[in-house]
Image (cartoon, helix red, strand yellow):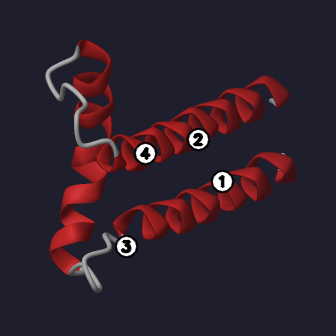
Amino acid sequence: MKWLLFFLDFGISVYRWMVIARVIITWIPSLDYYHPVVRFIYDWTEPVLAPLRRLIPPLGGFDLSPIFVFLGLEFIRGTLLRIVLMF
């Protein structure tokens, strides 16, 4: 059961770093958005960020959706941790 917790935690950590990379990518204006790595990050993060972006409009030009993704990921991680440790 510990291996399941490890893989869940690892997957959430990788996704968190992908969201961080997505935020950093938006700060670089001269970046090639068709680069395969950039496309990969966008393809994996956009399905989660886009619905939140529609619900939470940018505040003063700042996109707040990554903050809510982090909060959601921490909630999911904590819930899964409690469930796995119960068994």
Residue of label 4: 24
Relative to the observer, which residue lies in front, 27 or 18? 27
Whether tag 2 and tag 1 are in contact, CB under 8 A, the answer is yes
Q: Nearer the viewer, mark 4 or mark 1?
A: 4
- N-terminal of the two: label 4 or label 1? 4
Residue 14 lies left or right of residue 7; in this view the side is left
Mark 4, other Cα within 10 Å: few <14 / some 14–19 / many ≥20:
few
Residue 17 lies left or right of residue 34; in this view the side is right
Taking the spot 71% from the left edge, 60% from the top edge, the residue there is: 78
Q: Residue furthest front?
A: 30
Q: Which picture quadrant has residue 50?
A: bottom left
Q: Nearer the viewer, mark 2 or mark 3?
A: 3
Q: Secondary structure at mark 2?
A: helix
| Disc assigned to residue 64 | 3
Separation of residues labelled 4 and 3 (CA atoms) = 14 Å
Q: Residue furthest bottom?
A: 60
What amino acid does circle 4 point to? Ile
- N-terminal of the two: label 4 or label 3? 4
Separation of residues labelled 4 and 1 (CA atoms) = 23 Å
Separation of residues labelled 3 and 1 (CA atoms) = 20 Å
Position of the C terminus, as image quadrant, is: top right
